[in-house]
Image (cartoon, rainbow, N blue to C red):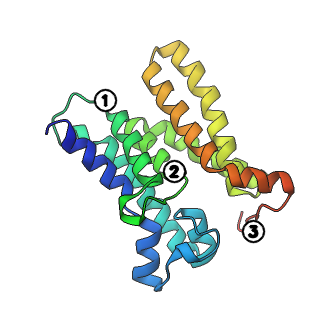
Amino acid sequence: MTILLPILLAYLLGSIPSALWVGKLFYKTDIRTKGSGNLGATNTFRTLGKKAGIAVTLLDILKGTAATLIPLYITTDIHPLVFGIIAVIGHIYPVFAKFKGGKAVATSGGILLGYQWPLFIMAVAVLLIALKITKMVSLSSIILAVVFIIYITIYAIFTGDYLFMIVIYILALFIIFRHRTNIARIRAGTEPKINWL
């Protein structure tokens, strides 16, 4: 129980479908029937507006952070980053939304916020710069994943924190894999662009 309970808690935290619940509670809208149908912040911004998008982004970030901080509240020998990964899996495959969730960018950021917050600030900066240049959330998310793969490899060489490196690799691969349909649209020149940055 001391192992299963915190793991289950991390998964359930990640499974909270912020976009779905915000859409239904405040906008009487099932976001799965709008836009891309994705349960993430980007689709929320596009279909429900800035307020809903910001709320969903913050909630999705906090899911990752809360899961990473589980060892502060429940005694366990499991590394905090493991709970973060489990929360991301919950976000991608949420039990509360028929196992069809978001693309894990914000929740992955929440892991950084809970484990090493300066890297979270770095991630936000990289994402905003990429957004400013490309005007595409999907491409910016992929750029962020690649930048962090490069950064964490160098970081691990100097610090020896190879577990953190492996976790970042996993998160980056999750993000890139979840954006595979966006990659096809980017290549075809049909990927939607933002107009607010």
Q: Earlier in the sequence, mark 2 or mark 1?
A: 1
Which numbered dot is residue 79?
1
Circle 1 packing at 10 Å, graded few (<14), some (14-19), many (20+), is few
Q: Position of residue 135 (x, y in %)?
A: 76, 58
Residue nearest the viewer, comparing 183 with 193: 183
Residue 148 in sight here: yes
Q: Quadrant of the N terminus?
A: top left
Number of on-image labels: 3
Check disc 3 and give the amino acid type. Asn
Which x, y percent locates residue 46? 64, 72
In the shown orientation, is residue 78 left or right of residue 26? left
Q: Residue at x 19, y 32 (%)?
A: 76
Q: Which residue in the structure is indicated by mark 3?
A: 195
- In the rendered structure, which disc, 3 or 2, sits on the residue that comes first in sequence? 2
In this rendering, position of residue 102 left or right of residue 179: left
> Within the image, what quadrant is residue 2 found in?
top left
Q: In the picture, residue 53 is in which quadrant?
A: bottom right
Question: Alpha carbon of mark 3 to alpha carbon of mark 1: how far?
Answer: 40 Å
Q: Nearer the viewer, mark 3 or mark 1?
A: 1
Would you place residue 73 above or below residue 12 in this image? Answer: above
Reading the image, the residue beneath label 2 is: 104
Q: Residue at x 71, y 68 (%)?
A: 196
Frontmost residue, 176 versus 145 = 176
Q: Is residue 51 visible?
A: no
